[in-house]
Image: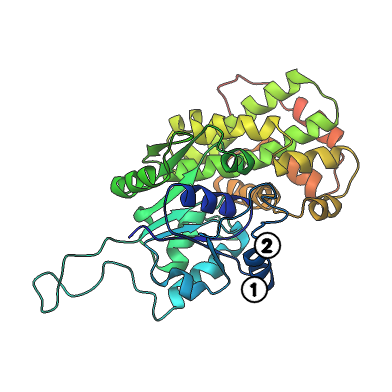
């Protein structure tokens, strides 16, 4: 009854599989590439993502999506944001993929006690280009899942620390409080504390846009701008994240919690953040292509910068840091020119946009 499948065998998906396995949940890890799935299954190593923590034999690794999800009560989606929609559409398309809990109506012939509904958990970060949708919205539309039941699992959590069992606190956010509570109970342990939230939209906006600000933080470090600049960047970055989130319908207080200031602080201050390393590399003269090739992992802030800028422009929301990072990433602007333009913006009160 506690069978779980993790869709996405990158660093976060692999780490969540390790975490659930340690808590006694029968766990399957799905990898889209059959060759890589076979390699991980044979070596029990997730390279280059989680090199220091071999997968125990109890974790099944497969590239067969339909067989992986057919009997799973818990589905954790941890794929990169740009492949979330096609994965969701594949889930919708399986003829054998019926929601657990469906069956004869109570009192009908052959009816038994109802099976529990599937628990859907989104661990994907980003904003979809073109639609401006968050991962929960994309998954709901693509897979045909009631969006209120999709739980967003997010917060300040580097995979390497979770894999090592170091203390971590995150959020399980959903419109359906019962689903959030189920996720909270599923993932919580002495080293992994889970709080619930009823503002999943705010959580998704916070943990997605912080990656853009982390690129800016890496740029600031690479340019040697100092701690004063970092303090200003984190504070004003949080202001623009909250500005967009509130315009979309999120609550302002969400951005003062784990999915806002919490996640923003760790990604803007540590080279463990891929997005921070993108900014650091750009400041040191590397091209975006060179940096991403060296990372060998997805830096969600690059795509999110484009999609967040487009969404903000459609809504008439001002995101000055995001605008300058977009110019550096995609328009050839020199990072120092971007800093200078931010500093020369019209003077205003801190509470103003």
- Classify residue 198 by image quadrant: top left
Q: CA distance from mark 2 to mark 1?
A: 14 Å
Residue 320 visible in the shown view: yes
> Which of the pair 311/303 is nearer the observer?
303
> Mark 2 vs mark 1: which is more N-terminal?
1
How far across and how far down the image is residue 182, in percent?
Answer: 33, 48
> Which of the pair 335/85 is nearer the observer?
85
Name the residue beneath numbered marker 1: 34
Q: Label 1: few (<14), some or many (≥20) within 10 Å? A: some
Q: Residue at x 44, y 65 (%)?
A: 141
* Side of 104 where 173 appears, left or right: right
How far across and how far down the image is residue 260, in percent?
Answer: 53, 33
How far across and how far down the image is residue 151, in percent?
Answer: 41, 50
Q: Residue at x 54, y 50 (%)?
A: 18
Residue 127 visible in the shown view: no
* Side of 296 where 162 appears, left or right: left
How far across and how far down the image is residue 43, in percent?
Answer: 68, 62
Name the residue beneath numbered marker 2: 43
């Amino acid at each position: 009854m506690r069978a779980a499948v993790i869709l996405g065998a990158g660093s976060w998906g692999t780490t969540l599989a390790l975490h659930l396995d340690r808590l006694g949940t029968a766990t399957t890890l799905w990898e889209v590439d059959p060759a890589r799935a076979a390699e991980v299954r044979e070596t029990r190593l997730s390279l280059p993502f989680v090199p220091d923590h071999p997968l125990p034999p109890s974790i099944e690794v497969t590239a067969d999506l339909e067989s992986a999800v057919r009997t799973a009560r818990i589905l954790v989606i941890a794929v990169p944001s740009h492949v979330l929609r096609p994965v969701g559409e594949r889930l919708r398309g399986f003829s054998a993929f019926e929601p657990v809990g469906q069956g004869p109506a109570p009192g009908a012939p052959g009816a038994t006690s109802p099976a529990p509904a599937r628990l859907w958990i989104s661990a994907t970060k980003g904003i979809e280009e073109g639609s401006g949708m968050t991962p929960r919205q994309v998954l709901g539309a693509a897979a045909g899942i009631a969006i209120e039941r999709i739980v967003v699992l997010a917060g300040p959590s580097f995979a390497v620390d979770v894999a090592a069992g170091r203390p971590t606190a995150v959020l399980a956010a959903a419109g359906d409080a019962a689903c959030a509570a189920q996720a909270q109970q599923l993932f919580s342990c002495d080293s992994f504390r889970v709080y619930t939230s009823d503002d999943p939209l705010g959580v998704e906006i916070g943990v997605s846009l912080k990656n853009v600000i982390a690129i800016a933080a890496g740029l600031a470090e690479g340019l040697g701008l100092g701690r004063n600049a970092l303090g200003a960047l984190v504070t004003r970055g949080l202001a623009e994240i909250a500005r967009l989130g509130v315009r979309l319908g999120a609550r302002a207080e969400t951005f003062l919690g784990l999915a806002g200031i919490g996640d923003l602080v760790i990604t803007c201050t540590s080279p463990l953040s891929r997005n921070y390393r993108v900014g650091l590399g750009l400041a040191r003269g590397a091209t975006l292509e060179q940096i991403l090739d060296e990372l060998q992992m997805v830096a969600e802030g690059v795509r999110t910068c484009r999609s967040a800028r487009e969404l903000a422009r459609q809504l008439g929301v001002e995101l000055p840091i995001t605008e300058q990072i977009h110019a550096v990433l995609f328009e050839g602007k020199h990072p120092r020119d971007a800093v200078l333009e931010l500093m020369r913006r019209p003077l205003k009160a801190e509470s103003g946009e």
